[in-house]
Image (tube, rainbow, N blue to C red):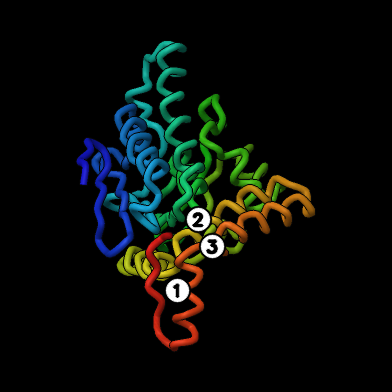
Amino acid sequence: MKTYETILVERPQEHTVLVTLNRPNVVNAMNTQMGLDLLDVFDGFCAAPNAQRCIVLTGAGKVFCGGGDLKQRNGMTDEQWQDQHLIFERAIRAMVSCPVPIIAAVNGAAYAGGMEMSLCCDFIYASETARFALTEVTLGIMPGAGGTQNLPRAVGSRRAKEILLTGKPFTVQQAFEWGMVNRICAPETLLTEAMETAATIAGNAPISTRQIKQSVNMGANMDLQSAMMFEIEAYNRMVPTDDRREGILAFNEKRKPVYRGR
């Protein structure tokens, strides 16, 4: 596996990649190098989706991500700020465009860009110690990594506007009740539970999981009739695959299917 300065990339189990934000001494804050590292690794996932079937994103230490590294940003010119943010934008686009399912394992506070990053994942498992906030409005800026778009899709526009306009933190229990978090886990079992779900996803036909993700994401921005037509096109992609034949054969032979992504 390629090594990076600010993130760890590991394969702890078959077909699963674990990406860990690894700046725990500064609450895993996003500096320019982390933006470049995330861009490189997620560009790689986009370019070679068959190399993994599920991705888990978490943070080192007791915090998921505290957002942008404001110490690095202190004193930046407008041009330097925008140049850095362009790197972050490209990294976020690579995450959103990634065809492989991504689970966020939020192990602690996820503030500002950290929360936005978790919302770019397909769903979130969070520790009992997790807290969330989009604090940008309190700093004279606004979310610029998908926060104003992904949050309303997760919790509804009225709840999202309250979170965005106040900048106030909220608890993991609130995030769960509002539909943003799928599961609350004990801190010591969070990664295990995320990995178990990743293993379940990775055990399914990878073309199927990628087509399902694409169908859900694309359909959310279409009228119902167009979305259903898109779904059928996605469905038809799987009919001529070896994995479809293997799935039906394994069912009839009463055994576990062995999928090969083709």
Callout 1 secondary element: helix
Q: Amino acid at mark 2?
A: Arg
Residue on which disc 3 sits: 240
Residue on which disc 1 sits: 246
Tell me which label, 1 or 3, sits earlier in the chain: 3
Q: Nearer the viewer, residue 84 or 210?
A: 210
In this picture, is 210 found above or below 197? above
Q: Residue at x 45, y 73 (%)?
A: 246
Disc 1 and disc 2 in contact, CB within 8 angstroms: no
Q: Residue at x 73, y 57 (%)?
A: 228
Cα separation between marks 1 and 2: 17 Å
Callout 3 secondary element: loop
Q: Nearer the viewer, residue 182 or 200?
A: 200
Cα separation between marks 1 and 3: 11 Å
Residue on which disc 2 sits: 210
In this picture, is 209 found above or below 138? below
Cα separation between marks 3 and 2: 16 Å
Q: Amino acid at mark 3?
A: Pro
Position of the C terminus, as image quadrant, is bottom left
Q: Amino acid at mark 1?
A: Glu
Callout 2 secondary element: helix
Q: Residue at x 37, y 22 (%)?
A: 73
Tell me which label, 1 or 2, sits earlier in the chain: 2
In this picture, is 74 found above or below 88? above
